[in-house]
Image: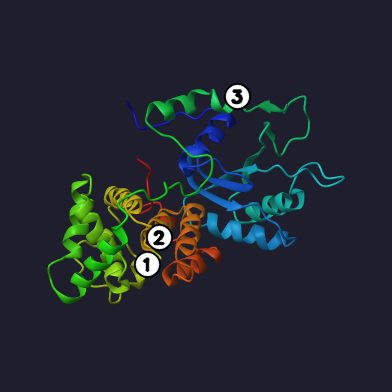
Amino acid sequence: MTNELRITSPADILSFIPHILGFAPKESFVFITMRGNTLGATLRVNAPTDTNTAGFARAMANYLALDTVANAAVLAVYTEQPAADGAPRPFNEHIESIIETLDAAGVPLKDAWLVTSEHWKNLLCDDLRCCPVQSLDSITDGHLNAEMIFRGSSYKDAPGTTYAPFNGPADTAEQIEHAGHVLQYSEEINGRVLWNRAIEQGTRITPETAVQLLACFQHPSLRDTLMCNVIEPERTDADGSGYLLLGEGITPDWDRVDRAEEAARELITAAPETYRAPLLTVIGWLYYLKGQSSVAAKHFTAALDDVPGYRLAELMEEVISHGRIAPVAADAATGYKKR
C-alpha cells in the first residue's frame, strides 16, 4: 500500500482535517497550506471574536509563512454562528481581510468552505446553482475518510482530556508519599532508569513501578529531567533545557514521543487526584511540541484543576495563550507526522 492519499475534492480535504488534527474542530478556522497540488502544513485557530480583522489576517499570514515552500492555502471555517445582517457569510470581514492579506503575501487563498453541524458549502461562492449546500454525508462517506479509517486513523469529537476517575487501592497516595521519602533519602529508586524503560519497552507498567514514577514526577527538578529524557534520553539533569521546553532546535524521535505519551497516560490512570497534574502537564507539553495547541491547552487546564496553581502548567498555558507555535512544529522537516 502506498502512503500517499489521493485527494480529489473539497469533501476529501474536509474529511482529512479531523484525522490530521485528532479531533473534530468546532468554532475554528483551519488553514492548510498548498505546495502545488500537495497539501502542506495544517493550522487550527479559534474562530475570531474581536473586530480587529486586519490583525487577525496578519497573524494568520505570519503563521502560514512558516511553510516556506507553500504557494497557496485553503481554509475551512467551522461554526454555528449565522451571518451578520446583510453579510453573505459568517466572519465576512475577517475572510475578506484574509483574502487580501494572503494574496499580498504571495500565498493566495485558493478555496474556502463553511462547515456547520448540518451541512457544508463553498465560502467564496454565493451562487447556489454552481455551489450548492452539501450534506455532511459527502464528507463522512467519502473514499478518503474510509481509507483513513482502514489505515487505523481515528479522531475524537473534541480535543478534551478523557481520563477515567481513579479506582486503584485506597492507600495509593500513602504509597506515593512513601516512595517520595525513599527517593529523597536514598538511591533505591532511579527515576531516569524507570522512565526510560517505560518509554522504550512499551509494556504495561507494574503497580510498583507506577507508584515510584508517580513519586518521581512530584519532584519538580526530577520531573523536568524526565521531561528532557523524552527528547534527550542521556541527559542527567534539566539545567539549560529551556530550548527543549519551547521546542527550539530539536529533532525529536516522534515514535519515542508517542510512547512517552502512552506511558504518561497509563500513569495518570494509576494516580489519585492531586497527583495527576505533572503527567497532564507532560502530555500537554508533548502536544505543544506536535503543534496541537488546542489539545495541549485542555491538558494544562486539567492539570490546574487537579492542582490549582501548578506552576509548570501555568507557564505552558501562558506560552500557548500568546499564540506561540513550537518551532519544531513549524518546520516541515522536524514537525510531527501522525502515524
Which three-letter amino acid code belongs to the residue tagged 3?
Asp
Task: Find residue 154 and report its horizontal and vertical position in percent.
Answer: 44, 35
Relative to 289, say whether 134 is above or below. above
Horizontal relation, residue 121 to residue 243: left or right: right
Disc nearer the start of the sequence (1/2): 1
Q: How is the image coloured?
A: rainbow
The reply to whether residue 99 is in sight is: yes
Residue 149: which quarter of the image? top left
Residue bearing the label numbered 2: 285
Residue for point 79% across, 44% down: 83
Tell me the SS state at disc 3: helix
Tell me the amino acid under the disc marked 1: Leu
Name the residue that disc number 1 marks: 245
Q: Which residue is mark 3?
A: 137
Residue 313, percent from left and from top? 45, 66
* Residue 228 seen in the current view: no
Residue 5 in the image: x percent, y percent? 43, 31
Q: Could you tell me which secondary element the residue under label 1 belongs to?
A: helix
Structural distance between the alpha carbons of marks 1 and 2: 8 Å
For the point 76% across and 52% down, the residue is: 93
Taking the view exactly as shown, the residue that stands out farthest to the right is 86
Q: Are marks 1 and 2 in contact (CB under 8 Å)?
A: yes
Q: Quadrant of residue 82?
A: top right
Q: CA distance from mark 2 to mark 3?
A: 35 Å
| Mark 2 or mark 3: whose residue is earlier in sequence | 3
Quarter of the C terminus within the rendering: top left
Q: Is residue 263 above or below residue 155?
A: below
Front residue of 271 and 124: 271
